[in-house]
Every structure is written in C-alpha cells, then in structure tokens.
Amino acid sequence: MARGGINKALVMRARQALLARGEHPSIDAVRIELGNTGSKSTIHRYLKELEESEAEQARGAVALSDELAALIAPLAARLQGEAEETVARMRQQCDAERAEFEARLAEVQEQIRLLEEQAGSVAAQLQAETKRHQHSREQLQQAEVEQARLRQANQDQAAHLKDRDEQVRSLEEKHRHSREALEHYRQASKEQREQEQRRHEAQLQQVQMELRQLQQTLILKQDEVTQLNRANERLASENAYRTQELVEQRERLERQAGELAALHGQLVQSHAAKEVLQERLVLLQSEAGELKATLDTQRQEAQALHIGLAAANTELQLLRQAIAGEQERARQASEETAAERQEDF
C-alpha cells in the first residue's frame, strides 16, 4: 500500500496541476505537489499507469480524430480560401480607390498651387499699383503745394502791383497839384510879371526840371508796371500749365484706381476659387476617411473570419478532448465491470 494515504486520483490531480503550470510532472515534482507525502515508488507506479492510460486513449482516439480532421479540413480550407479571396478582393478595391484618391488629391494640390501662384502674382501687381498710386498721390500733393506757392506769388505780385498803382496815383496827384500850383503861380505872376520876371523864370525852370524828373520817374514806374504785368502773365501761364498737369495727374489717378479695383476683384475671385478648392479638398479627405473606415471594417471582418476559423479549430480540439474523455470513462467503466465480474467469480 502507498504510504501517507496517497492514491492514483491524488497523483493524477497533482500531475494535471503541474502540466497546467507548464512544469514537467517528475516524481519529485509530484511528491512536492502532494506535500512531500507518499513513496517515490508508488508515485512512479501511478505515473506510469497514468501515462499508459493516456497512450491507450490517444491510440483509441486516432481513428475518430482522423475522420473528424478529414471532415473539417475541407471546410477549414474552404473558409480559409473564401476569407483570403475576400481579403484580396477588398485589398484590390482599396488599392484602386486609394490610387484614385491620390490622383484626385494630386490634381487638387496642383490646382491649389496654381491658384496660390496666381494669387501671389495678383498680390504683387496690386502692391506695384499701390506704390504707383502712392507715387502719383505724392506728385499730386507736390503739384498742389507748387500751385499754392504760385497762387501766393501771384497774390504777392498783385499786391505789389497795387502798391505800384498807388505810387503812380500819388505821383499823378503830385503832378496835378504841381500843375495847379503852376497855374496859380501864373495867375499871380501876371500881376507881378514885370517886378519878378527873373525870379518867376527861375522858379519856372526849377518847376519844369522837377516836372521832367517826375515824368522820368513816372516813365520808370510805368516800365516797372510793364515788367510786373509780364511777370504776372508768365505766372498765370505757369499756373495754367500746372493746373493742366494737375488735371492730367487726377485723370491718371482715376484710371489707376479703376485698374486697382479690377485687380482687387480678380484677387477676390481667386480667393473664392481657392476656398471652393479647399472645400473640395475637405470633401475628398472626408471620402478618404470613409474609405479608410470601410477598409478597417473589412479588415475587422477578415479578422473575425480568422477568429471564427480559430474558434472552429478550438471546438474541434474540445470535441477531441470530449471524445477522449468519453473513451476514458468507457474504459474505466469496462475495467470496473471486469473487476466486479472477477469479484463475483
């Protein structure tokens, strides 16, 4: 009898526990699993019986296992072939859709690049027109300043001419007074002509000399007035020329403003086209995401098929184990029946 109260069932449970942990069911390992009880010879005998029993069960299950394998192998091969065919078809479809999407994406990117180049060119033209507009505006401001200066000079010349006119009128007034004084002197000299003839002649000569000086002064003033009139005419001509230049510059500015507005409209259209292309790019990216999601779903379905195949293999193994258990129980029942018959005899 085995010492320590061990039996075959305890040895079998200890052996199964070691196998479940992935350990080799040696005599010492089984004895340690049993709590260091039982003799090694008894454990060795029980282990040998268990190994022989498993070998017999394996030999008995070979025929049924081969038959089940022969039935399941075509089904498994068919499932594997259908799964691989489905995966290949889905992969080809996905590659075609990916190639089409990449071609469309490249086309859209090329359109975006062309629009960006066009927008850059329009922006450069707009900047150049803005600089020309600024330069024309500065020229207009300079022309306005020059016109204001000429207007002020004209006003100064007019004031100067007015002063000259006042001086001429003053000289004429003096000349008139002189003539009146001369006439009065003549009237007075009639009464004293004989007594003051010489003094009268001397005074008359002096007055005539002063009159000649006044006339010469008047002639000089008239020459100055003529020169001032000529200068005024020249300034008026220059003012008219400056005014004509100012009108032409304003017309050029108006034309440049119209061209600038047209370029701005083209830039707005370019931005609108760019936004439309960007929206199309977003839609294409969304479609790409949907295609990717479809591909992921198809991959998940293929993985599910693989998992189903693995589950079928697992069920096959479990079925084999169940058949082996049934055969073991049938063998044990036959052994018990045989033992009972021997006891009866």
Image: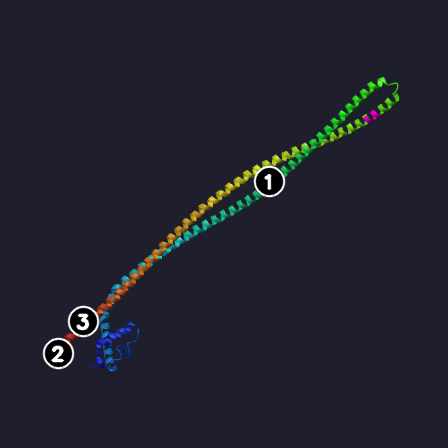
Residue picked out by circle 3: 330
Label 3 secondary element? helix
Decide whether residue 209 is among the magenta residues.
Answer: yes
Of marks 2 and 1, which one's residue comes earlier in the chain? Answer: 1
Relative placement, left or right, of 238 versus 129 is right
Label 1 secondary element? helix
Residue picked out by circle 1: 137
Q: Residues within 10 Å of mark 3 (few under 14, many from 20)?
A: few
Spatial separation of the CA atoms under disc 3 and disc 1: 113 Å
- The quadrant in which the N terminus is found is bottom left
Displayed quadrant of residue 4: bottom left
**Residue 13 rendering spot, x and y as whole percentages:** 24, 74
Vertical arrangement, residue 119 with respect to residue 253, above or below: below
* Label disc, if present, on residue 343 of the rendered structure: 2
Label 2 secondary element? helix
Front residue of 230/152: it is: 152
Q: Amino acid at mark 3?
A: Ala
Spatial separation of the CA atoms under disc 2 and disc 3: 20 Å
Displayed quadrant of residue 198: top right
Q: Which residues are magenta?
A: 206-210
Q: Amino acid at mark 1?
A: Arg
Q: Are marks 2 and 3 in contact (CB under 8 Å)?
A: no
Which residue shows up at 77% across the image and 25% down it?
174
Q: Amino acid at mark 2?
A: Glu
